[in-house]
Image (spheres, rainbow, N blue to C red):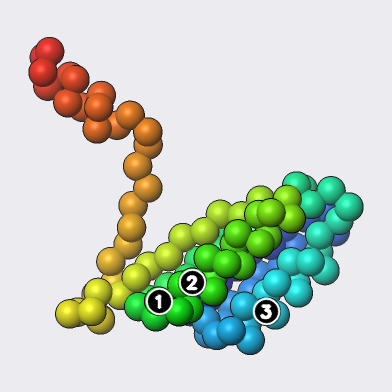
Amino acid sequence: MLQAWISSPRGSLYFAAPATAYNLETLRSHVRALRDEEAARTCLALNLGGTEDRALLARVSALVAALTLEGIHVRFSATVAAPEAQSAPVRARRRRAGTDAALLNSRAHG
């Protein structure tokens, strides 16, 4: 499932649809329609849930890269289904820079 929140000075839009090539192009059209002259004021939050389709992930990555090159602020997150347990998705976590080093340093000197 593809979920997207687009916001810009021209308006905002919530978009939810199955993750298909057609719907990715539809999303691209909506983002471009809401973009104003200053693309940096347009934001897209994109969530791709429960897929293990690598071709689809590549298409989404290409869309994110293209919109970013146009100056649009994009936040992307994905939940990838584990092949052995498709009913239990695995969510990748973001880590703050320096978290591991600070923890190891505190244990070494603590």
Residue ID for mark 2: 58
Residue count near mark 3 (Cα–Cα under 10 Å), binned few <14, some 14–19, many ≥20 = few
Tell me the tag on residue 54.
1
Q: Do the numbered discs 3 and 1 sit on residues whose CB atoms are within 8 Å? A: no
Q: What element does badge 2 sit on?
A: helix
The quadrant where residue 87 appears: bottom left
**Residue appearing at x 73%, y 50% in the figure:** 71
Percent across and percent down for residue 101 are: 25, 27
Badge 1 marks a residue whose secondary structure is helix
Identify residue type, mark 1. Arg
Residue in view at x 17 percent, y 26 percent: 104
Residue 56 percent coordinates (x, y): 48, 78
Q: In which quarter of the image is the C terminus?
A: top left
**Gap in Å between the C-alphas at discs 2 and 1?**
6 Å
- Earlier residue among tags 3 and 1: 3
Left or right of residue 63: residue 32? right
Q: Position of residue 88 (x, y in %)?
A: 24, 75
Relative height, residue 7 to residue 49 (above, below): above
Q: Residue at the top extreme?
A: 109
Looking at the image, which residue is at 53% across and 65% down?
61
What residue would you read off at disc 3?
25
| Residue 76 versus residue 96 in the image, above or below | below
- Badge 1 crowding class, 10 Å Cα cut-off, few under 14, some 14 to 19, many 20 or more, is few
Asked whether, in this view, residue 81 is left or right of residue 55, the answer is left
